[in-house]
Amino acid sequence: MRGMTSVFEILSLLDMICNELKPQDIRNCASCNKDWFSFFSPYRFKFVQFSNSSQERTLFLLENSHHIRELELNLTNAEAFVNPQCTRLKKLTLEFAYEDEEELNDAYPDDLEQEELNTIEGTDSPVTKLDKSMYAAELIQMNQGLRTLRIDSDRRITKPLRPLTKSILKAIANHPCLTTIQISMSLPCFVLLKVLRQLPRQLQELDIYVNSDLHQDEQQDDHQYHMH
């Protein structure tokens, strides 16, 4: 005779419960006993804030990346999560920053349609490397159920970056489910205009906080835009 069904065996109900719990609460539930561990363990990976970690911990997270619903990571780590399992994200936060030797050219190109390859100067034979924003674009494309995208820049970075490249804008424009986009970084006006032209049709909320060069010869000011 089969025993009584645990309320936690009803997946939709367990989802609702875990949606109301903080990450620490979920970890506490998973540590209660063996049965609760089996129920709550996958939800420990619901929210992942990834930074440089040991290879062992990184592999552990990647093995469980199919459980991740909210992912926050630096662009320099984006490549690691471009794998077949990490496809169920609902919210993605990308922080754009580069190591000194990986910084992009300070000047924005006149047209973002150019090839997204960067040549490292100052060597006898120039080395061409792929812009890491390509990995971010692929993450967006892989997660067709993504609802919220947040793009930030590391506040310690003072030089302009080129996060909103052709591949990123295309991934945003063609995404079928994105309803909320939040951008917080320094952007030239012409790049901001390109963003506004590449928004997905189903977008419901757009938050932009930028330091924009509205007047090239005047001091730059912070501007915040909120659209529904």
Image (cartoon, grey):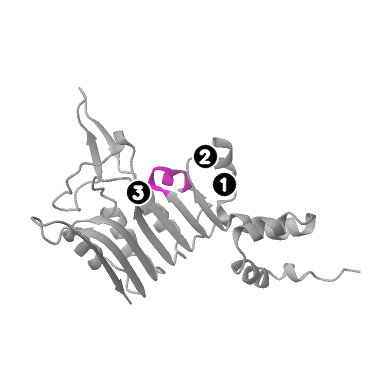
Residue occupied by mark 3: 154
Label 1, residues with CA under 10 Å away: few <14, some 14-19, many ≥20: some
- Figure disc tally: 3
- Which span of residues is magenta-colored? 74-81
Q: Is residue 13 visible?
A: yes
Q: Amino acid at mark 1?
A: Leu
The disc at residue 53 is: 2
Spatial separation of the CA atoms under disc 2 and disc 1:
10 Å
Whether the magenta-drawn stretch holds residue 78 is answered as yes
Contact check, label 3 and label 2, Cβ < 8 Å? no
| Magenta span: chief secondary structure | helix
Q: Earlier in the sequence, mark 3 or mark 2?
A: 2
Camera-near label (3 vs 2) is 3
Q: Quadrant of the C terminus?
A: bottom left
Q: Quadrant of the N terminus?
A: bottom right
The three-letter code of the residue at mark 2 reads: Ser
Circles 2 and 1: CB atoms closer than 8 Å: yes
Q: Which residue appears farthest toward the bottom when viewing the image?
A: 228
Sequence order check: which comes first, mark 2 or mark 1?
A: 2
Task: Give the residue at x 34% y 37%.
Answer: 99
Circle on res. 61: 1
Report the front residue among 216 and 3: 216
Residue at 15% over, 53% down: 111
